[in-house]
Image: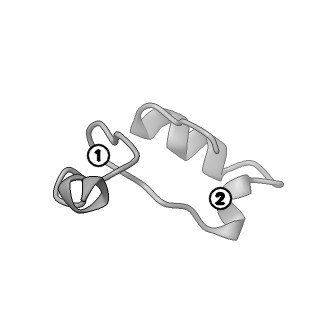
Amino acid sequence: MRLIRGLTNLKMLSRQVDSPLAEGCVATIGNFDGVHLAIKPLLIK
């Protein structure tokens, strides 16, 4: 897993010849706690 902060850093990384972005990526906006808040109550049951 790689954390890329900001579009500038993403653009620089995508220009690299052996960029890990060539294999695909997932982008999130905001904070991600690992479990969506709507799913958490179901997992507790």
* Residue 43: percent from left, percent from top: 31, 58
24 horizontally vs 31: left or right: right
Quadrant assignment for the N terminus: top right
Q: Which residue is mark 1?
A: 29
* Residue 37: percent from left, percent from top: 20, 50
Above-or-below relation of 21 to 2: below
The residue at the point 56 percent across, 61 percent down is 25
Which numbered circle lies on residue 45?
Answer: none
Above-or-below relation of 26 to 28: below
- Identify which residue, 31 or 21, lies in the foreground: 31
6 horizontally vs 14: left or right: left
Amino acid carrying mark 1 in the image = Ile
The residue at the point 52 percent across, 36 percent down is 4
Q: Secondary structure at mark 1?
A: loop
Residue, far bottom: 23
- Identify which residue, 14 or 37, lies in the foreground: 37
Amino acid carrying mark 2 in the image = Leu
The residue at the point 46 percent across, 35 percent down is 8
Q: Which residue is mark 2?
A: 21
45 horizontally vs 17: left or right: left
